[in-house]
Amino acid sequence: MKISEMKADLYCIECNDDTLHNIVYLNSEIKCVECEECNRKVEVKVDLKKEVYKEIYNRVTTKPSRISQEYKKDLSKFLIKLPRRVVSKPYRAVRYLNKARNLTKKMKFK
């Protein structure tokens, strides 16, 4: 899961003018838009479980093609790195799940 922020000039109905807004994304979905002049905030309800599911599903389904691309690009480099990646995968998966869990808790309190 990834939270990113972007600034954009948008029309604010409170200010009746184009003002700078802060847009917060959760993965590729808009989570929140806030006017920097009047601090009017519009929040969009995002289903965090669905976002985590979509991300994991996408990573699992594209894994075979990504592995194929890697070994076609450089087989010797792929074979050298493979044992280390296999051993570290459970730790990377746990780290990802902890990050997603912490993000879920953080988003619920906002």
Image: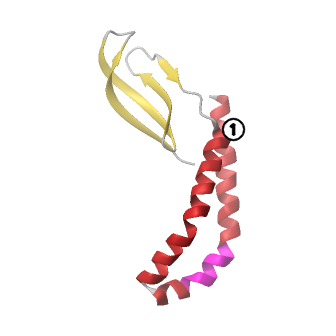
Secondary structure beneath dot 1 equals: helix
x and y, in percent, of residue 63 in the image: 57, 68
Q: In this view, does 43 lie above or below 26?
A: above
At horizontal 62% and vertical 28% (from top left) the residue drawn is 110
Magenta region: which residues? 80-88
Label 1: which residue?
Answer: 105
x and y, in percent, of residue 94 in the image: 70, 60
At horizontal 59% and vertical 28% (from top left) the residue drawn is 45
Residue 46 horizontal side relative to residue 5, left or right: right
x and y, in percent, of residue 109 in the image: 67, 30
Q: Residues within 10 Å of mark 1 (few under 14, many from 20)?
A: few
> What is the magenta segment's predominant secondary structure?
helix
Callout count: 1
Q: Is residue 96 above or below residue 9?
A: below
At horizontal 48% and vertical 82% (from top left) the residue drawn is 71
User: Quadrant location of residue 19?
Assistant: top left
Of residues 101 and 76, the one drawn nearer to the viewer in this rendering: 76
